[in-house]
Amino acid sequence: MQAYIKLREGLSNLYSADEATAIAHEYIESLTGLKKMDRLLAKDDLLNEVQYTTFHKDFERMIIGEPLQHITGYQWFASYKFIVNNHVLIPRPETEELIQWLVEECKIKTAISILDIGTGSGCIPIAIKKKLPTANVTSCDISEEAITIAKLNAQNMNTSIQFIQLDFLREVHWKDLPNVDVLISNPPYIPVSEKENLDKNVRDFEPATALFVSDDDRFVFYRKIALFGLQKLNPNGAIYCEIHQNFAKETMAVFNQAGYSNIELRKDIYGNDRMLKVFL
Ligand code: GLN
């Protein structure tokens, strides 16, 4: 228990009390393999010498804000365990809801083709492929390092997905991407000017390319996705995307101006405007 308390206290400057407690429990569980209840029942400190050395190293990393997932190396998402590192965004629960939306609406169709834009850890295409096994799933990302992690996750989860490394913002590359029935994306959408408002663990340790867009062109990804959709979506196709909670109206306007007349907005479990489904 001593290590747990030390960690919880060390994290209390960076996180809320609930978050610090949850992180400390999860860390000790991943270190010892023991569930919270088993640890609570044992009165003594449970760490052996090797674990203690590891704990001290990890403690120093965590109290400067390094995310737990970078220490343990994984994050659960849609009930699958994804390998993560500092080259990929740590999968968020909001994104599970976006996938849920797509899967509910597409599960009656077989052999549907889907393109995910900005794969990161691969959490979106892999979770979709798991839930829609007949779907043909392609995914792209600008980062070579992210593609490496995504491929590793796809392999670990026995899913077959085509991963393509390219810069989606450069339209010359679109010829390398397939025509599809569905587009899905959780693109970067935080204006750099909001960087200082983010938690330290996100701001200093998660990849900037996955998070930020310039203030002058904050909807650049949505504009390009809309345009790409006009060129590459099959008839009756649809786009599902995650959005910045404070810019729902503006993001919807981007699609509307591009010619999409059907735009549906949904909130996430926290009640924030978080995702759109769009079609012509
Ligand atoms: N939702 C993420 C966050 O809270 C941001 C994801 C993104 O920019 N696509 O940091």
Image (cartoon, rainbow, N blue to C red):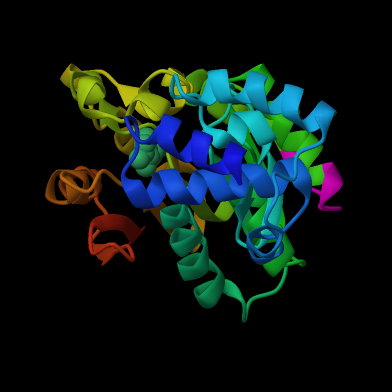
Name the one closer to the observer, 16 or 210: 16
Q: Nearer the viewer, residue 241 or 177?
A: 241
Residue 50 in magenta?
Answer: no
Residue at figure coordinates x 64%, y 50% from the top left: 125
Give how far across and how far down residue 69 sits, in percent: 59, 36
Report the front residue among 211 and 114: 211
The magenta segment is 155-162
The quarter of the picture showing ligand 1? top left
Horizontal and vertical percent position of residue 172: 51, 19
Q: Does residue 99 sit above or below 119 in this rendering?
A: below
51 sits to left or right of 101: right
The quarter of the image holding the C terminus is bottom left
Is 120 left or right of 161, judged from the image as shown?
left
User: 67 and 183: which one is in front?
Assistant: 67
Identify the residue at image location x=76%, y=67%.
134
Taken as a whole, is the magenta stretch helix, strand or loop?
loop
- Whether residue 62 sits left or right of residue 244 in the image: it is right
Residue furthest to the front in view is 44
Q: Is residue 159 magenta?
A: yes
The residue located at (41%, 18%) in the rendering is 204
Q: Residue furthest toward the bottom?
A: 108
Whether residue 179 is visible to the viewer of this picture, yes or no, is no
Q: Is residue 14 above or below residue 136?
A: above
Q: Is residue 19 above or below residue 103?
A: above
Residue 108: image x %, image y %?
62, 81
